[in-house]
Each structure stands twice: as C-alpha cells, then as structure tokens.
Amino acid sequence: MSIKDKFNWGTGITLAIVVFVLATLSTVSYLISLEFYLVSENHYEEGVEYQETIDGIQNARNLEKQVLILFDEPSVSIKITFPEELRADSLDGSVTFYRPNDSGLDKRFKLQLDENGQQFIPVGDFEEGRWKLTLEWKQDSLTYIDQKNIFI
C-alpha cells in the first residue's frame, strides 16, 4: 500500500478540521493572554462633560489660522506653533499625550510658549506606537481643544 492509497478525501477533511481547530485555539489563547487598559480611569465623568469637549473642538476648528502640531525630526520632539493672532499673555493650557493601551504611560505638559509662539516637547523617551495628543487652551473665556493621533 502506497502513501497515495492512505491519503484520501476523508483523511484530507480530517486534517483540515484538525488544523482549523488548532489555529482557532491558538488565536483564542493568545488573545486571552493580552493585557488591555481603559483609556481613562474616570471615563464616566469625562463622558458627562463631553459636550464641553465638543464645543472646544469646534472653537479650535473655527479659528481663522490653526495651531500647527508637527513632529520635529532633528530634536525628536513635537513642535507646537501658535499663530501670532492667538499669542497672548492670558493664554493658559496643557498638552496631554494619551496612550490608548496603557494609561500608565500618559503624560501631561503645561503649555509654555517661547517668544516665537512655539513649544517643543521631547518625545524620544516615549514608547513607540500610537498616541493621542490633546492640546487644550483657554483664551478670552473660551476653551479650545485640538486633538491629533500621532505615531512615535
């Protein structure tokens, strides 16, 4: 009896089912072993206050000149540039970096513009991957929010 006689369509179907079951079990066990985190510990409170966030995002979009948020390669930092029309002594705000899969890595910086209306935030020591950058500032009793997804 040759190997060709032992391998028929019944053996093929059985092998296909066994491979499928093993692949499914491997995938399920891998997914169960992954750790996941909430983006925020106080997500309920943030959800209730989300209308303020929507208003802040709309205020930022309605600006005649937008704030520029760019990655500066030579300094390995995020460069934030405010247009001259928005630079004022009353400008107060913060820059927050959210790590979607690990809230323990979140970072917050006070908005401190130099004389050119710029701020450089070094990101060389950040974990590589996806981050959500939220720039929030208040000026003339209005709140402005600009959000960007960035990859480091």
Image (spheres, grey):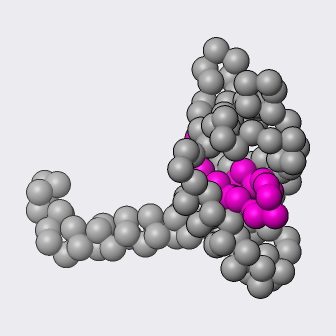
Q: Which residues are magenta?
A: 134-152
Q: Is residue 31 magenta?
A: no
**Which part of the image, by quadrant, shows the C terminus?**
top right
* Residue 129: quadrant of the picture: top right
As drawn, which residue projects farthest toward the top?
74
- Quick check: 4 above or below 24? above
Nearest the camera: 84 or 143?
84
**Which part of the image, by quadrant, shows the N terminus?**
bottom left
What residue lies at 77% left-to-right and 84% top-to-bottom? 48
- Quick check: 113 above or below 54? above
Q: Position of residue 89 (x, y in %)?
A: 87, 41
Q: Is residue 116 left or right of residue 72?
A: right
Q: Position of residue 67 (x, y in %)?
A: 62, 43
Q: Position of residue 36 (x, y in %)?
A: 72, 64
Nearest the camera: 12 or 110?
110
Q: Is residue 6 left or right of residue 141?
A: left
What residue lies at 61% left-to-right and 20% top-to-bottom? 73
What residue lies at 55% left-to-right and 60% top-to-bottom? 62
What residue lies at 70% left-to-right and 44% top-to-bottom? 86
Q: Position of residue 30 (x, y in %)?
A: 60, 61
